[in-house]
Image (cartoon, grey):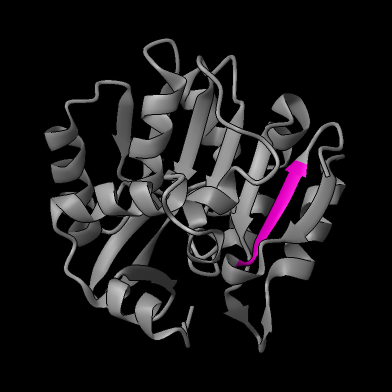
Amino acid sequence: MIHENPFISAFIRIPEWTWKNRLRHFLATSRWVPNFIQDFSPIKGYEKFRNLHEGDIVIDAGAFPGDYALFAAKKVGSRGHIYALEPSPANRKLLERNIQKSGLENITILPKGLWDRSTTLTIQEQGLAAQVKTAESDDLIDVVPLDLLVKELQLEQLDVLKMDIEGAELQALAGAEKTLKHFKPYTCVASYHIVNGETTAGRVEKLLKQAGLQVRTDYPKHLTTYACEKSLF
């Protein structure tokens, strides 16, 4: 996502030092931070219609650099759990470092991406983001459908599904139909990514509606498509 705001652009260019996530959390939640600044925070956006609850089970797809995973882990507590998916090896090293330094024990890192089938793809490192490619690139990654992953993890509960996966959300949601229909999680999909000349928001809405969920696209500073079983909108 290209940010025209110079402050956001400057923040993005800061290296991913450990304190940066703490600053992200402060900017998203502190009552001392004005709303016009908080409104740029994806973390605040993911909770726009439902706050995380103690005991929630969360899948965080596209977890780098752990900002949402760490935030969520503190809120769901010891009875909850976060499954943090990050297929990029370089990004995952930073994610592992941040989680280790946090001391939190309710986060499981999964070295996978989401897709509509199980396969191996290539990935091209792009600074803060990692975008799946089917042409030759830097690294090979494993991708799986969410339906299969949930089965492998033997999940009996899924309360929140968050995705920020650089345009791969369309394939990921196509591989998540059974999971969405069965668990009906509160779902937040970053849908500002441009695929074939347009944001993925409209196509994400269609896929989520096909799973029988109520759907809304909102939060224009970090365009997100939300879905839930009963309307929270």
Q: Main secondary structure of the magenta part?
A: strand
Residue 126 in view in this figure: no
Q: Residue furthest top?
A: 79
Look at 20% across and 72% down and name the residue there.
14
Please tell me whether residue 152 is drawn above or below residue 113 in the rendered image. Answer: above
Question: Residue 229 appears in which quarter of the rendering?
Answer: top right
Q: Is residue 16 magenta?
A: no
Provide residue 219's location: percent of width, then percent of height: 66, 62
Look at 28% across and 63% down and name the residue there.
140
Provide residue 104's location: percent of width, then percent of height: 24, 25
Q: Residue furthest front?
A: 32
Region in magenta:
223-227
Provide residue 117's location: percent of width, then percent of height: 56, 51
Provide residue 199's location: percent of width, then percent of height: 67, 77
Look at 85% across and 49% down and name the residue there.
209
Disc tally is 0
- Left or right: 175 with respect to 164? right
- Left or right: 183 with respect to 4? right
- Left or right: 178 with respect to 96? right
Q: Nearer the viewer, residue 93 or 145?
A: 93
Please tell me whether residue 187 is drawn above or below residue 140 in the rendered image. Answer: above
Q: Is residue 225 magenta?
A: yes
Question: Residue 100 appears in which quarter of the rendering?
Answer: top left
Look at 48% across and 50% down and name the residue there.
43
Q: Nearer the viewer, residue 63 or 182?
A: 63
Locate the C terminus and report the quarter of the image it occupies: top right
